[in-house]
Image: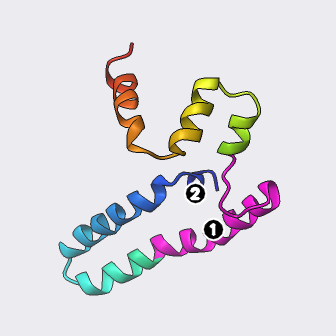
């Protein structure tokens, strides 16, 4: 379930469907190959989604709380608390700083 904790799964999932389609296209039985591969990829994610929501509900009292708010409230750097309060968890305001720290900051 650790992999499902990332919102990235929602954005990367379609990439894998495209990979499966590309892989199946090269075979003689492309139509018969693509659908089973896509279903095999999607079923574990669809089954694990409700489990993750239930886990979050039991742990934090809300199915959509992932624990970031708890981490910030229990000892985070004050700068991160201010940023989270001002912009939320995902915002374009973080792009510049994150790009700098990813590529420039040693």
- Secondary element under disc 1, as helix, strand or loop, is helix
Residue at the spot 63% in from the left edge and 68% down from the top edge: 48
The percent position of residue 88, horizontal first and vertical second, equals 54, 45
| Residue to which mark 2 is pinned | 4
Instruction: State whether residue 3 is above or below residue 79.
Output: below
Quadrant containing the C terminus in the rendered view = top left
Q: Camera-side residue: 50 or 78?
A: 78
Looking at the image, residue 97 lies above or below residue 36: above
Q: Position of residue 105 (x, y in %)?
A: 38, 16
Looking at the image, is 75 positioned above or below residue 92? above
Q: State the predominant SS element of the stretch in magenta.
A: helix
As for residue 52 lying within the magenta part, the answer is yes
Q: Which residue is mark 1?
A: 48
Residue at image point 74% right, 67% down: 54
Residue extending farthest to the top is 106
Residue 10 found in image quarter: bottom left
Quadrant for residue 11, please give it. Answer: bottom left
- The magenta region covers 40-67
Query: Are circles 2 and 1 on residues that touch, CB within 8 Å?
Result: yes
| Secondary structure found at label 2 | helix
Mark 1: few, some, or many residues within 10 Å (few <14, many ≥20)? few
Task: Using the rendered view, name the quadrant where residue 81 is placed.
Answer: top right
Q: Is residue 97 magenta?
A: no
- Check residue 59 in the rendering and tell me which mark sits there, or answer none: none
Q: Is residue 34 left or right of residue 93?
A: left
Choose the circle earlier in sequence order: 2 or 1: 2
The answer to which of 46 and 61 lies nearer the viewer is 61
Where 10 sits versus 91, above or below?
Answer: below
């Amino acid at each position: 379930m650790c992999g499902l904790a990332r919102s990235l799964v929602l954005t990367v999932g379609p990439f894998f469907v495209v990979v499966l389609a590309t892989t199946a296209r090269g075979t003689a039985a492309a139509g018969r190959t693509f659908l089973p591969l896509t279903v095999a990829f999607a079923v574990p994610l669809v089954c694990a989604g409700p489990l993750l929501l239930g886990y979050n509900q039991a742990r934090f009292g809300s199915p959509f709380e992932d624990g970031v708010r708890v981490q910030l409230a229990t000892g985070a750097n004050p700068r991160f608390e201010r940023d989270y309060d001002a912009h939320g968890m995902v915002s374009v305001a973080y792009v510049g700083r994150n790009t700098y720290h990813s590529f420039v900051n040693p």
